[in-house]
Amino acid sequence: MLSRTADHLYWMSRQIERSESLARMLDAHYRHSLLPHTPDVVARDWRATLSSLDVLDPYLERHGEVRPQSAFHFLAFDRDHDGSIVSCLRQARENARAVRGTITSEMWETLNATWLDIRRYEPEAPDSDIGAFLEWVRYRAHLSRGVTLGTMLRDEAFRFTRIGTFLEGADATARMLLALARPGLPPADEPAGPDAYAWTLLLRSLSAFEVYRKVYRDAVTPWRVTELLVLRDDLPRSLHRCMNEVHENLRAVGNGQSAETERRAGALQSAFRYGRLEQLLAPGLDVFLAGFLEQGRDLGWRIAQDFLVPATTY
């Protein structure tokens, strides 16, 4: 497969996944905002989210201070910010348009319709429903993935869409956990006190609350939430599951220069398969997640060097 074609497919799937992950993050904030909180707590939570996404400095340069409304708009609707939901869906559509001969017509029609619909959305309109909008973004991402799974030939093109989807999914889960991590501390194996609702929202935002109840049948604790989202290989959005998929699909498209990339993906997969949570989190949850995100960036860079059109960000 041409590297440029693989590049478009890889980034198309990453941008679809990123738009959904942002919608999940923002939905958690939206639901949390319905409860009474002091302005300092609200600003702290938004700052943690912006920091976990590595966009705190660009946001502050533009807006000066962290305010819920401007932070929400920055992450959802700002067309000048490449990491907003609107920008991700635009870029996903442009990447799909570049490879219309490789993807199926149903995939193109789904992404094109999503972009045309979001262009007509007016967030400042009096009757706009933020909750409904975020649910719509998640639905369109689900639809795009379903069409991909239901219509694409299981060839190299399909493999690159899966690599992009799961590498981005792992990144998003790690960042959502990082937003709740306390510096230098492992998560507690006891109810989270004032932050209990935030951990429950994290589960709900990752569609994992019912799974948590089925697995643990007990109160929500930060340790168990972390265990579920890091080590469970049967949870679709866990780090373990995502790295299993990345490694499997990298092996399927391996070439003469990708051995080291496959080895590093396999090392990450093995750390989750054979590692113990208390060992992984000994330096603190935040340190572990920062290290994982750095390894994910390195893996993205190596995938670009081995298969794609090299770029500067991953």
Image (cartoon, rainbow, N blue to C red):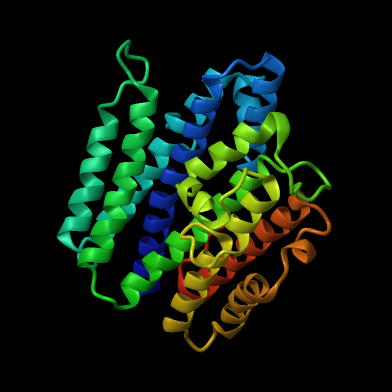
Instruction: Give 75 or 239, whichever is nearer the viewer.
Output: 239
**Quarter assignment of residue 47:** top right
Q: Residue furthest left?
A: 105
Q: Quick one: quadrant of the N terminus?
A: bottom left
Instruction: State the count of labels.
Output: 0
Question: What residue appears at the point 44 percent right and 38 percent down from the top-left corner?
Answer: 23
Question: What residue appears at the point 34 percent right and 21 percent down from the top-left corner?
Answer: 129
Expressed as whole percent of the image width and height from the top left, the position of residue 189 reads 74, 49
Q: Is residue 103 visible?
A: no
Drawn side of residue 124 relative to residue 100, left or right = right
Instruction: Give 206 or 1, whichever is nearer the viewer.
Output: 206
Q: Residue furthest front?
A: 217
Expressed as whole percent of the image width and height from the top left, the position of residue 215 reads 54, 57
Q: Residue furthest bottom?
A: 256
Question: What residue appears at the point 70 percent right and 26 percent down from the top-left corner?
Answer: 44
Residue 106 to residue 84: above or below: below
Instruction: Give 272 or 254, whichever is nearer the viewer.
Output: 272
Residue 165 to residue 116: above or below: below
Instruction: Give 98 or 185, whichever is nearer the viewer.
Output: 185
Expressed as whole percent of the image width and height from the top left, the position of residue 36 reads 60, 15
Residue 31 to residue 111: above or below: above
Expressed as whole percent of the image width and height from the top left, the position of residue 193 reads 72, 32
Drawn side of residue 192 relative to residue 161, left or right = right
Q: Quick one: quadrant of the C terminus?
A: bottom right
Drawn side of residue 192 relative to residue 170, left or right = right
Q: Is residue 204 visible?
A: yes
Question: What residue appears at the point 21 percent right and 49 percent down from the top-left corner?
Answer: 110
